[in-house]
Image: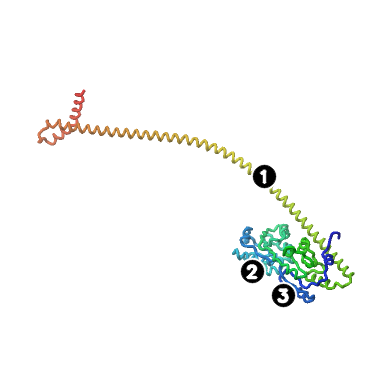
Amino acid sequence: MSGLRPAMLLKQEHRTIYMIKKILVSQPAPATPKSPYAEIAEKYGVEFTFRPFIKVVGVSVNDFRKQRVDILAHTAIVFTSRHAITHFFKLCEELRVKMPETMKYFATSESVALYIQKFVQYRKRKVFFGPTGKPEDLVPVMAKHKSEKFLVPQNDSSEGSFFRKLDEQKLRHTDCVMYRTESVPVTKVEISAHGMVVLFTAAGVETLVNSYPGFEQGTLRIATLGNAARIAAEEKGLRVDVVAPLPQQPSITGAIARYLEEEAGRDRSTAPQSVTNEASAEQELKLRRSVAAKKGAETKRQKQTLTENLQRYTEAAQESRTRAEEVRARAESLKRESDSLKKQIDGLQKNYEELRHQYERAQREAERARREMREAQSKADKARAELDDLEAQIAVRSKQGNGSKAKPQTVTKKVALSAAKAKPKTAAVTVKKRSSGKK
């Protein structure tokens, strides 16, 4: 026991003469007036104040959508608490997601499973629950439905042991945060008015320590239920006076009652009290060793998980490196093909430019030929006009030359036609004579 200061021994060292009159419980008040707290209050004359140190709030629709989780892509929903059920169906309502009748539901306990009927029609063949209420004990039930795809709504501070169990069973699952825990700070006046504070979670311990600057425990007694709250309190340097569960005090109310009896019987003989304290110290030591063993086993599992993850990531990195080399070789091959195609394109571009120049030259030559043809046509039209002019003049002169030799108008029609036919020949002879006379 060197270096260890069990909580029960610390309790003996810090015991005061003041009786506890008020106890602050960091939970909501019991639903019924008949409870173990009421019995303790009546028997020992103490007053209980129920005041939660934490509250559970749901995540917003935008925060949930950032997780990129499709609810209807799953065939089964796993609930670890009533909070998970409440905030799951509230979020579904906000997202306008309607649960199909084929959806299956898994719960950690029967009471949690019965709570589902507040939101959907309860069908036994669609609802399954674990035997003990612990999430880990629900895994064998889920393993009987390996074909399902599970969705697990969780708190933002949930532990990963449950998901490791699911991975070991090779169950397809998706975890998502649908609610989170927030602190509800307590005042210095509230704490100083009570002689004991009962804590149930590590978040409750955090709220107590950070409730106001300069917090000191002093004579305040602290009771914890569960290893998580107890370890968190000791890590914060707090003195834990009442611990549960223990073999002789499995409930927190039983542990508080025993502590009040011990405080009320301070005048008892030292020997029995010493024996009791030694037994409690021995139990305390066993519990500490059990917690240390669990933490060691958890650390070993985490180390093994990290090693497996490292090996998996190394193999993935090697595969990625191989794929990168293949992609690089393919890229170089494509670059060579691209360069070859570029050279071909450059050659075709040069051929195109040359053909374009040839086409343009042909166009210019064709235009010049058309222009020359138009000029020749114009000259031909002009020559034809001059020729027509000349023929007209010849015809006029021929008429004038033949007018003096004309026969009387009593010439018959037949003679007139013969004269008309002979006229061109005469005109041609006249032109020939004139042209020879000019010479």
Residue 29 is left or right of residue 2, and the answer is: left
197 or 286: nearer the viewer: 197
Residue where numbered disc 3 is placed:
32
Considering the numbered disc 2 on the image, is that residue within a helix, a strand or a loop? loop
Where does label 2 land, which residue?
A: 119
Among numbered discs 3 and 1, the one appearing first in the sequence? 3
SS type, badge 1? helix
Which comes before the other along the chain, label 2 or label 1?
Answer: 2
Above or below: residue 116 compared with residue 69: below
Marks 2,1: beta carbons within 8 A? no
Residue type at tag 3: Thr
Residue 316 in sight from this viewpoint: yes
Model colouring: rainbow
Q: Amino acid at mark 1?
A: Thr
Residue underneath mark 1: 322
Q: What is the C-alpha distance between the residues marked 3 and 2?
A: 24 Å
Q: Nearer the viewer, residue 433 or 193?
A: 193
Q: Residue 190: x, y in percent?
A: 73, 69
